[in-house]
Image (cartoon, grey):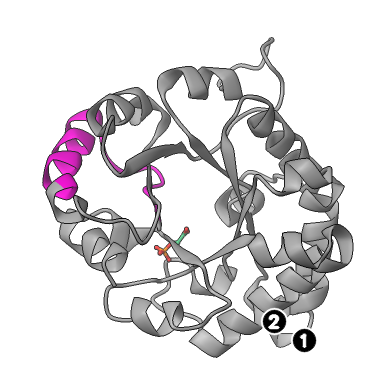
Amino acid sequence: MAGNWKMFKTIAETTQFIVDFLPLVAGVTHADIVIAPPFTAVADAARKTAGSSVAVAAQDLHWEKQGAFTGEVSAAMLAEAGARYVIIGHSERRHIFGETDDQVFQKTRAALGAGLTPIVCVGELLAEREAGATNQVLARQFGGSVGGLTLQEFTAIIIAYEPVWAIGTGKVATPEIAAEAHRFIRSEASAKFGKDTANALRILYGGSVKPDNVRGLMAQPEIDGTLVGGASLDAKSFAAIVNF
Ligand code: PGA
């Protein structure tokens, strides 16, 4: 169960969240819990969650190890700061910042190279769904990015299905719609990497997940977890999602 904070929370706000949140998820063993604060708060969040059931993710990275890339952060820098996961190819990265499938692929390999667990996002726009092109889009995003990994690399990633029309809109995908997309992604994984690998792959659903809709989503065997934006900013709300 992962919380993507996007460009919200200072270091002080991150610290306060962790103080409030840790007691609410202290006994949790049924899920891995991840929070993804902005870069500036990653190191503090990692220190403050050390030894707890909560791990820290970054929200992006650059694929090169170092170099003249003003404004960018490498996988090794994130690992050193204490991140254990990194979100890659979020739709806001793709659609606001023009990130491509090939960049998602390179970022995923860089993350794996530094021992980070990539959470790779895919998902269709509303127009693509309405045009009946959802599977085509998912196949293109899958094939153009994580489809290029080796089998060993692929076993170490997590995929998040995030239909763009459901992100930040309050319009959650029905559990059936989400499960159908997850099934399709898993079938792509199976075709490329084999059935056992596909069955072991964790696919998270993201897009307007809230405490009051998470149970229905998690009741679908195809849905292995959630990637939560807005509802992960509040400790009680995110704890209610984790403890669905
Ligand atoms: P949301 O965002 O939960 O606010 O819809 C999800 C995401 O962008 O990961």
> For mark 2, does the 10 Å Cα neighbourhood hold few (<14), some (14 to 19), or many (20 or more) residues?
some
- Residue assigned mark 1: 132
> For mark 1, does the 10 Å Cα neighbourhood hold few (<14), some (14 to 19), or many (20 or more) residues?
few
Q: CA distance from mark 2 to mark 1?
A: 5 Å
Could you tell me which residue is drawn at 27 percent across and 80 percent down? 212
- Residue assigned mark 2: 129
The magenta stretch is 2-22
Q: Quadrant of ligand 1?
A: bottom left
Q: Position of residue 154 (x, y in %)?
A: 74, 48
Which quadrant is home to the C terminus? bottom left
Image-quadrant location for residue 13? top left
Q: Position of residue 28 (x, y in %)?
A: 27, 56
Image-quadrant location for residue 178? bottom right
Q: Identify which amino acid the numbered label 2 is placed on.
A: Arg
Q: Dots 2 and 1: beta carbons under 8 Å?
A: yes
Which quadrant is home to the N terminus? bottom left
Q: Is residue 72 visible?
A: no
Could you tell me which residue is drawn at 38 percent across and 76 percent down? 170
Q: How many marks?
A: 2
Badge 2 element: helix
- 160 in relation to 36, above or below: below
Q: Identify which amino acid the numbered label 1 is placed on.
A: Gly
